[in-house]
Structures are given as C-alpha cells and as structure tokens.
Amino acid sequence: MMTLRNTVIAFFLILAAIVVTKTGTGDTPRTTSGGGSGSGGRVVCSVSPQRPAEKDGRIVAATQFRCDSPGPDGLTVTVHLQRSDGGGWTTVAKDTFVSNSVNTTREKSAESRTRRVSAACAGGTFRTLVEASVYDDKRSTPLSKVSGERRNPC
C-alpha cells in the first residue's frame, strides 16, 4: 500500500526527471532533426552568429555552428553580412557552406566550424544573418538567427 509520503516522493522524483530531460542550454536557437548517419536518434544543431567586426580593412560577418555527435547527414549554412538601409536590411555579402557528420561536431575545432564573409569597410549599421538547413534521415529542418548590430565597425 502506497502512503501519502511515498506518493509525494514519487511525484517529485518524476518531476525532477522531467525537468532534467527537458532543460535546454542557453538561448541559442536549436533545431532537432532525425537520426544522423542512419542512427535512428536525434541530432541537435545550433548556429551562433557573431556581430560584424573589422579585420584587415574589411567588415567581417562570421558564424559558428555545432551539432550533436554523430552529426547530421548534411548541414548547409548561409552567412549574410547585412547593412541597415533605413527601413530594412540589405545583404552586402553572402556565401553558402556545406558540411556533414563529424565535421559539424565538437570533435572538430571551433575554428573549423566557423564560416565568414566580408565586404570593404563602409559606414553604417551592420549585422550577421545566418540561415541553415539540417539534412538528416531524409528530412530537412531550417533554422536562422541574427547577431546583434554594430555601427561603423571600421
């Protein structure tokens, strides 16, 4: 026979298990897709755009990506350097990069998981927009994130 005390203890143990398994890490948008490399599991990927910065006389927009091991079947990342045009944002430079499996995980260095685009220095307010697609288990899952703005980075 279950006592009230045992019921309360069981309730809190179940509640703690739910909180632990559902708690995310930070505020980085994440996307979940089907099992990587045929594993049947779930692969979680995230992108972290950086605020534009000046380097060697150019404005550089960069992002870093990371996926859980074993990584997805494919990850396509498009990095946009955008400039405010008063009523919206105009892309001044962009490039698309493709990676997959272990090349998207922490098993590779942060530098090898960072992608950049650049444009000549100019005045204005700039930001980095990242659009990505995670391809896994014959499914595609989109995600995107915008960096903070930087005024006159050069």
Image: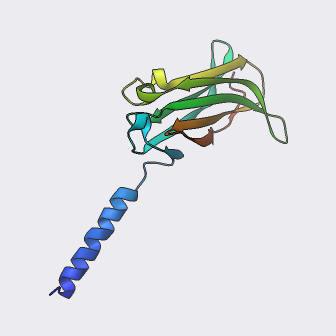
Between 112 and 86, which is closer to the camera in this rendering? 112
Placement of the N terminus among the 4 image quadrants: bottom left
Residue 116 in the figure: left or right of residue 7: right
Residue 91 in the figure: left or right of residue 12: right
In percent of width and height, residue 13 lies at 25, 69
* Residue 28 seen in render: no
Q: Quadrant of residue 2?
A: bottom left
In percent of width and height, residue 128 lies at 66, 32
Between 112 and 98, which is closer to the camera in this rendering? 98
- In the picture shown, does residue 5 fall above or below 32? below
Placement of the C terminus among the 4 image quadrants: top right
Q: Residue at x 52, y 45 (%)?
A: 31
Q: Residue at x 58, y 30 (%)?
A: 76
Residue 9 in the figure: left or right of residue 114: left
Instruction: Residue lying at the far top in this picture: please name it.
Output: 56
Q: Residue at x 54, y 31 (%)?
A: 75
Between 90 and 152, which is closer to the camera in this rendering? 90
- In the picture shown, does residue 78 fall above or below 143? above
In percent of width and height, residue 74 lies at 52, 30
- How many numbered circles does the render carry? 0
Residue 1 in the figure: left or right of residue 135: left
Instruction: Residue lying at the far left in this picture: please name it.
Output: 1
